[in-house]
Image (cartoon, grey):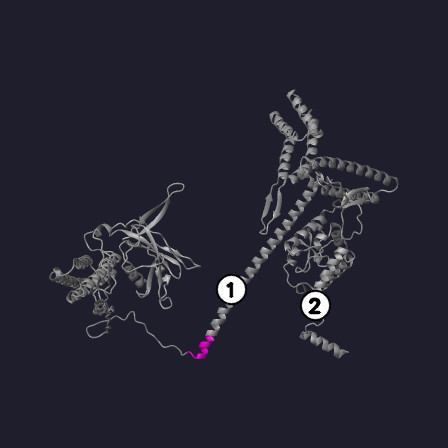
Amino acid sequence: MADPEKEAGDLAEAEANVSIAEQQVIEDTSVTEQTEEIIDFARTAEEQTDATQSTETALPSEQEQLTLESLSVTEELVERLDAVTEPEEAHAEPQVQDDVADVKDLSDEVQSDVDTTAPVVEITPKAVRTLAENLSGLSAETHAVDSTSSGVSESQIPEVPEDTEDTEDFTTIVKIMLHPDIQVFTMAFDINRTVGQMKQYFSSRLKIPLDVLQFMLLGRIMENSETLQDLGAKCHGTIQFDMFSLDEEHFPIKSSKLFQEYYMPGVIMVRVQTDADTFRDISIEITRPTFEKPFLGGFRHRLTGVEYHNAGSQTVPRKRPEKGYEEFCRSTQTAVEKKKLQQTRNTTSTQMTKIGVYVSNITDKLIEPKGYVTAEEYHARRLKAVIVIQTYFRRWNAINIVARLREEKRLRLEWEEQEEQRKEREKAERLRREYERRMHPKTKDDFELLYHALELWRQAELARIDGTFTGAERKAALCALLEKEAELIASIGRHKLNADDENEQKAILSFLEKCASPKKWKAFDGKITEMDTQFTLRARELLEIYRSISMKDILQDERLDVLLTLKHTVKEHDCKLTHEIVELIDREADLMMRGVKEYNLEGLRQRICTLFLQYIKTPLFNPEVARYLKVPPDPMRLYHNIYFCLSCKSYLPSTDFAMSASSHTVGRCRRCCKLDNEARQREAFLKYKLMLRNLRQSEMNYKDDAKIAFLIQQQDLQYMVEKFWGSQSALSAWDDLYDLVMVRWDKYREWAPWNTVLLTKDEAESHLKLTTLEKAYEMVFVHRIKHKHILSKNYFSQFPEMAAALHKGDKQACSSDLLVAKPLTPSSAKQSIREKTAH
């Protein structure tokens, strides 16, 4: 199949050559007329060829007919060319003969294309008539122009290169700057293509008249007869010029028409870097695909609607082998419809007894008419049947309801039994923990429980002695009780000393871990960010060394390695403390090499640990520790938040004092209060601490910036529970404080002593599920709770911090009472009318 673009260029060249020949032999009118007819037939053949290439399918009979017509047209064209060339061979100029030969070659090429192409489209008379009219106008215009006034000399007429076989594949890349859009359009053209032929191409693409388009190169208007080679273009090179319209108002150049479809150029230029500063331009020829790639599927974007197709391979698809027979044909793909009746016959007959025929009547039945049923009887029977059905349905429904209730009761009893067992297990576990804490006390709360148990035992023994003995026997029993109490207090003291030793080591490690912990902060998205500084890394290194030297029962080589590491660490600073540590390290190493036993080195190792701990707590050697020392390095910081304890006569920081909301003065420190409690009341405050911890945790879960729950201290909560709520639940009067919790009375408001209620854990969970308290509880119970709230308000309004929170809550609750005008509802209007009538 011939290239349409190349054929169009050849045809345009032939037309230009024929027009030049017409100017040279314009005196011979017969030759001109025959040349016009040749042009007419050449264009008709070219249109037939283009139509042949664009047509995809045609019926076999129509293809044969169109092929014959095209052959006849081609033969007629050849005969006319022979008729022109033979008579006028002696009179025509050589240039005209060459042009006619070119046209004849073009016709041969068209004929070869028609012969090799199966599908052909018939040329309509209307198209031939239109083309003839256009060419006749061109011919008349040619006759009207004088050869002397045309301004075209023989030297200006471009000659067609003789060696067309060598230059027919030579192309150049043309870059055209479109005005006024200032966009560059790139396309590959033949190097012998003229400016006029390019104008015809762009005129058809842009739908603009030919005389309106204008090309300009370096400020010079380009002539139609100039070729790209004349303009300086080189083979496989690049040339750029401008294209604009002479009538931009009516015929503007729209770049969108050129860029609607992307045409890959035949040759592209690629710049390749060969050396560090050397670049080379290489022309690459584009090979056009000769087949259509198959559709292999794809997908469509749900938001943008853009379709994406799966890429196909660049290889030519494999051809199916010939099977020797026709596999697909129209007859096998066309369904043949037929109309035919499908009704079958069923022939039946009836035979009766007659002369010569006997038919048995053994299977016959005798049908007798029954009594007539009236409408009332029918409906009465239906009603009776309905009643029977309803009876059985109600029985079935009642059985199901009873079974469901029985199942719910069983599940409820099982749940109650499980809850009871759970409570018993929790209580037993709590008692076991309390017993374990009394037997092996370790914390302050453990010793508090131990002293509280001692006080309970003392009071029980004192009550037994008062009720059993009198006189001298009572005094003797009291003395024995006092001796037993002193013995138990001494035993508790020994346990406390052992616990202090263990807790001291744990406190040291906790202090060092706190110094070595990285900096942490919470980001806006809730994630925790950690960062290590040079000071935290130094503290972590010292912590690891301290753990190593505190370890026991390690091998001698490992101990020597630890001592060597410690020696190199403390040698970084030269002072009296480091000299003592180095001396003790050398002494222990020497004794270990002499074979001294382990238990004889315990005192020496303890001195090394003590001195190294002092080294760690020095801010000069460990800067991070300065943030956690109770005695800061700067003496001026001691003047801030320091208070005087009237009991132990010591100046202590504010964190060592237990300040309640009802406190007006600082009072005694925590240590003095603890010592006084162990000596006198011996009360256990663990249950109140747990209750306060649960209250603060529940308020944090609301995430509504609750503050009052964190102002209340353990002494304030104890006073509320004992004085206002009687140390029992408001609903069930349960008096085990370990099972009681403080929750909000109105869950939509912040917790406060005047917005709380004391309930068990199960009751509190049910209470927080209520939406309307007045409908859930009786008015007597609501008034009793309100009375307790009033008592709390009167008590806590005496303290400044609590009074400010109370007034803030009252402003929010009573904001509607501060309005100058209130909305009038029907109920309020009726009440006001009644009051006026009563007055």
Above or below: residue 570 compared with residue 106 = above
User: Helix, strand or loop at disc 2?
Assistant: helix
Q: Is residue 515 visible?
A: yes
Q: CA gap, disc 1 to disc 2?
A: 58 Å
Front in this rendered view, residue 480 or 380: 480
Task: Tell which tag, 1 or 2, sits nearer the viewer.
Answer: 2
**Badge 2: residue crowd in 10 Å (few <14, some 14–19, many ≥20):** few
Q: Which residue is mark 2?
A: 816
Quadrant showing the N terminus: bottom left
Number of marks drawn: 2
Q: Quadrant of residue 770?
A: bottom right
Q: Quadrant of residue 278?
A: top left
Magenta-drawn stretch contains 374? yes
Q: Which residue is mark 1?
A: 396
Front in this rendered view, residue 759 or 655: 655
Q: Is residue 178 left or right of residue 585?
A: left
Under mark 2, the amino acid is: Ser
Q: Position of residue 262 (x, y in %)?
A: 34, 57
Chain part drawn in magenta:
373-381
Q: Is residue 89 left or right of residue 813?
A: left
Front in this rendered view, residue 360 or 574: 574
Under mark 1, the amino acid is: Trp
Magenta-drawn stretch contains 283? no
Quadrant showing the C terminus: bottom right
The tag on residue 563 is none
Q: Quadrant of residue 22?
A: bottom left
Q: Position of residue 715 (x, y in %)?
A: 76, 50
